[in-house]
């Protein structure tokens, strides 16, 4: 289906009912509802395509997929209880980073005091964005080993999971991995220069041949990583394959941050067609509303109308603030329905207090 079919519907249909999307990123500032939204998108995708498999990944060290589903997830993909074609995975970027440093160390020399091993660490430490870059490589590697599929990392999603949904971390570094190819290019250049510089010295110290070979291996490995990453990035910049869904709330700061995020995404050539505005009060309906909610709703409406104007070319999805946390599959299912059918407070208002208690 083409995006035109859904022109500016205030829903996520263009994401959920899309047939070609392989990667869906959900992002935004802390606490706005990224996890709730990414779970909801994943659930709706899984329900809309029952014959396909979906994977929801959290790269946030705070790991709230387990909390959202009331089910323990870890670094291996595990099916969501009660939804046979959705799996979740929680990856710790920090431990990925530690693994990578260790791996580099042991790969290039067993001696931690070795100049080359140390050099690798110094270099990776000195390039901005390399932490996030390596973390993301770790994520892709995990997906790869999960599916044990042959071929390039980028093929994996096509082979096993129809779509992989990312619940991204709320930090400002979420998007650094999009700069990964150029980051790695810089790293490669640095390794090359440094190894040329140190080669004579190392051979003077003896053991030069072995060192030389290790350097070559390191270069080969980095080159391989770089080509895989370039391929993945080509996919991330292809709107048929990848989209980013910003989540925000109707407040000044959030609106401002969202605009910044969107500009950043555009600069990375990443597709954004839909924005989720979460936690709306919809407090128009008379007597049972308290003054506080009425006042906050008036404020929310002010920012909503600004967004309606600013984002008239986007699908602006307006989600209600419910009376409880949105936890557990049953509640997430109820909530996520309104990603596809615009929430109407008069007709659907019962949803607000119609949640099951989380276990
Ligand atoms: N529309 C909503 N109605 C009621 N509760 C909500 C709604 N959206 C989110 N919540 C609740 O608010 C809390 C924060 O939501 P969530 O974890 O999705 O935010 P987040 O953006 O992922 O936060 P973080 O930045 O900490 O990862 C959760 O307890 C969630 O259940
Ligand atoms: Mg979260
Ligand atoms: Zn109130």
Image (cartoon, helix red, strand yellow):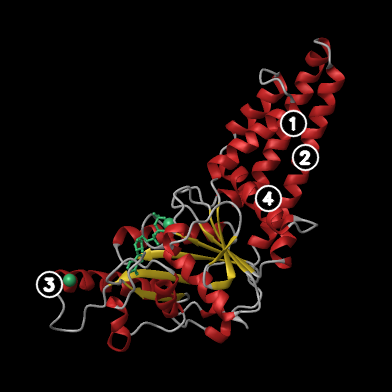
Image quarter (top left, top right, bottom left or bottom right) of the N terminus = bottom right
Picture quadrant of residue 79:
bottom right
In the image, which disc is placed on residue 141?
4
Image quadrant in which the C terminus is located: bottom left
Query: What's the CA distance linking mark 1 and mark 3?
Result: 64 Å
Please name the residue that numbered disc 2 is placed on. 221
Instruction: Indicate the secondary structure of the residue bearing disc 3.
Output: helix
Residue assigned mark 3? 291
CB of residue at label 3: within 8 Å of ligand 3?
yes
- What's the CA distance linking mark 2 and mark 3? 62 Å
Task: List the single residue furthest toward the front.
Answer: 359
Q: Which residue is mark 1?
A: 107
- Does ligand 2 reach within 8 Å of label 2's beta carbon? no
Front residue of this view, candidates 288 and 130: 288
Rounded to the nearest angstrom, the CA distance separating label 4 from label 1 is 17 Å
Q: Is residue 108 left or right of residue 179?
A: right
Q: Residue at x 74, y 40 (%)?
A: 222
For mark 1, give the secondary structure: helix
């Amino acid at each position: 289906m083409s995006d035109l079919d859904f022109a500016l519907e205030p829903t996520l249909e263009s994401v959920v009912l899309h047939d070609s999307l392989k990667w869906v990123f959900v992002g935004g500032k802390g606490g706005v509802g990224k996890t709730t939204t990414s779970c909801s998108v994943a659930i709706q995708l899984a329900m809309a395509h029952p014959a396909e498999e979906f994977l929801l990944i959290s790269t946030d060290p705070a790991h709230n997929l387990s909390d959202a589903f009331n089910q323990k997830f870890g670094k291996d993909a595990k099916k969501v209880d009660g939804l046979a074609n959705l799996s979740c995975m929680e990856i710790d970027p920090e431990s990925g980073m530690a693994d990578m440093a260790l791996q580099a160390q042991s790969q290039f020399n067993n001696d931690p005091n070795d100049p080359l091993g140390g050099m690798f660490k110094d270099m990776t430490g000195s390039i901005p964005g390399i932490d996030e870059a390596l973390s993301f490589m770790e994520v892709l590697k995990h997906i790869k080993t999960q599916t044990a599929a042959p071929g390039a990392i980028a093929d994996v999603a096509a082979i096993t999971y129809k779509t992989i949904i990312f619940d991204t971390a709320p930090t400002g570094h979420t998007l650094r991995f999009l700069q990964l190819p150029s980051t790695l290019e810089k790293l490669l250049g640095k390794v090359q220069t440094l190894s040329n510089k140190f080669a004579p010295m190392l051979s003077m110290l003896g053991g030069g041949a072995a060192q030389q070979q290790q350097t070559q291996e390191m270069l080969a490995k980095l080159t391989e990583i770089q080509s895989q990453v370039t391929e993945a990035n080509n996919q991330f910049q292809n709107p048929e394959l990848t989209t980013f869904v910003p989540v925000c709330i109707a407040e000044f700061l959030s609106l401002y941050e969202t605009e910044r995020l969107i500009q950043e995404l555009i600069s990375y050539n990443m597709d954004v067609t839909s924005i989720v505005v979460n936690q709306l009060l919809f407090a128009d309906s008379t007597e049972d509303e308290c003054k506080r909610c009425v006042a906050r709703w008036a404020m929310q409406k002010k920012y909503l109308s600004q967004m309606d104007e600013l984002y008239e070319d986007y699908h602006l999805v307006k989600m209600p603030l419910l009376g409880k946390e949105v936890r557990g599959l049953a509640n997430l299912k109820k909530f996520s329905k309104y990603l596809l059918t615009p929430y109407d407070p008069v007709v659907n208002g019962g949803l607000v207090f119609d949640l099951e208690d989380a276990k």
